[in-house]
Each structure stands twice: as structure tokens, then as C-alpha cells.
Amino acid sequence: MRIETATEPGDPERPNEDFVAVALPASGQGGVLVLLDGVTPHPEGTGCVHGVPWFVARLGGALLELSGSRRDMTLRECLAEAISRAARQHGETCELSHLHTPQTTVVAVRWNRDAVEHLVLSDSVLLIEGAGARTGHGSGDIRAVLDDRLDHLPEPVPSLLAAVRALPRGSAEREAARAAYGRAVESLRNAEGGFFTAAADPSVAARAVTGSTPRAEVRAVAALTDGASRLVEVFHERDWAGAFALLRKEGPQALISRVRAAEAADPLRKAFPRGKSHDDATAVLAEL
């Protein structure tokens, strides 16, 4: 079994809000992989005194422990309990009903001799390589498991985004349109018809994308936060199979380095529009 991880903050002056961990039980019968991408704190505040890294570490640690030790629980049940545990640790100092209370995306993978289970919530990405996959660039039996609700938000979000991109950079009109777009997106966070992230409400676990694949049909899995997946989704330098081939040949750090090079080549985000010039980036590869 080969497992490699790499992570890098988008800004060295800010804490990395990503989390990645792998557990391999002493029985040798399987393992667990957990990847989280904390949501950048809202400028108007979160109602929490602890901060996003604090929350992500506690949720990630609880989810790893539960997924590894409680095989009788589904991954959705493990996530719900992990959210409840993290919420209890906030104490009375935090307003957990706040719309921007600390929150995160989630990817979890659990495997044993029989099956590979997965869970994806929000815009981090899970890649599953089939047992018969080829490893050449741009080819291979690679399946991307996505929770793409954030990419399919209803009006007026698409129209507002188009308006932002059509207005001159640096103009007051563009900034006003950007603010309106941001408010429209945030109104759909953890709301019907919108998108979902793990915060303080355990019921959100029921919204996660889940599934199971026979172990014999899986050669490897990989998980990427959206700061790493932008190599495919933003810069279009590779498809998912090509990204997986890069992970296998050169490792997760090489993929992140490619992302950083692409970001540096477009510092003003003109060629490739994106919310941040640089983002926290984390990748993990597990060959089963």
C-alpha cells in the first residue's frame, strides 16, 4: 500500500485551513482517509471565538476516529456524530446558528477487504481509479465523485456572476456587482435549492454524496481540495485521468506545484477567473 499527501497554504501569512489524515487499523484489514477544506471566514464574522482551523481540526479528527473505529456506522452517521461532537466543543461562547459559523467541505473514504465506501460534501473532489486503469496521461478508468451543487445554483446567481465578469476591473460597478453576487451565493448556503457544507448542524450529513464500490474493482483513490483541483477545474491543464496520472508518477506535491505555477502565470485572474489568486491546496493519493 502506498499513501502520499501534500498540503500548502495559499498565503504563508495565513493558517492553512485544509486537513488531511489517514488511519490504518492494526488489523491490517482496511483504512480510512479524511480530507477537509475549511471555508474562509466571512468578513462580517462567524459568531465563533475559535476560528476555522480549530473547527476543521476537531471535525476532521472526530470523523477519522469514528470512521475507523465504528464500522457499524455508515459514513453519513459518522459525519453526523463528528459534527455533533465538534459543536459540543464550542461551548457557550459561540453562536452556532450564525450563517457563517466555521464550516468545511468533507471527503471521507473507508475500505476493507470487501468494499470501498465514500462520502463527499461540497466542492472537494474524490477520484476513484478502477482496477483495470491505465496510467498514461489523459487516459485510464478514473471516476470523479463530485458534489457539484455549488456549480448549479439558481438565478439570480448565474446572471450576477456574468455581470461581475463583464464589468471593468477595479470599477465601483464591478465591486457592487461582486458584493451582490456574494450575498446571493451566501443566501443559498445550507439551504434548500442551494449547497451544503459541514458546520454545526448534523443533519447536513444526509446531504452528502455517498456510495460503495467492490474492493476488487478499485486500484487507488485520490482526494483534492478545490485549491488543488483547480489544475483541472480552473486552469484546464489536465483532465481527471491526467491529474491522477500526475499524482501517481510525481506525487501530490508535484500536482500542487503545477497549480502554483499556473496561479503565478495569471496573478490578476484575468485569463482564469477565480475567487482567490492562491488558495490552500491539499492532495492525497492512496494506492490500495
Image (tube, rainbow, N blue to C red):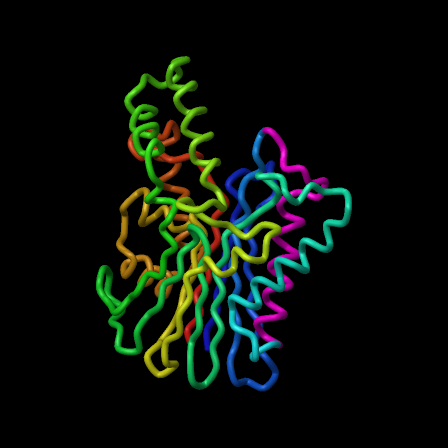
Residue 119 appears at what percent x and percent y?
45, 64
- Tell me the residue at 43%/25% (across/down): 180
Vertical position of residue 68 compared to residue 285: above or below: below
**Front residue (pair 128, 283):** 128
Q: Is residue 27 left or right of residue 93?
A: left
Is 65 a magenta residue? yes
- Tell me the residue at 58%/74% (across/down): 68
Vertical position of residue 145 compared to residue 176: above or below: below
Residue at the front extreme of this rendering: 192
Region of the chain picked out in magenta, as a range: 44-69
Q: Quick one: quadrant of the C terminus?
A: bottom left
Residue 195 appears at what percent x and percent y?
43, 47
- Tell me the residue at 58%/30% (across/down): 43
**Front residue (pair 252, 76):** 76
**Which quadrant of the figure has residue 11?**
top right
Q: Is residue 225 left or right of residue 54?
A: left
Q: How many marks?
A: 0
Is 254 a magenta residue? no
Residue at the left extreme of this rendering: 139
Residue 90 appears at what percent x and percent y?
72, 49
Vertical position of residue 216 compared to residue 11: above or below: below
**Which quadrant of the figure has residue 27?**
bottom right
**Front residue (pair 83, 16):** 83
- Most prominent secondary structure in the magenta stretch? helix
- Tell me the residue at 35%/76% (across/down): 218
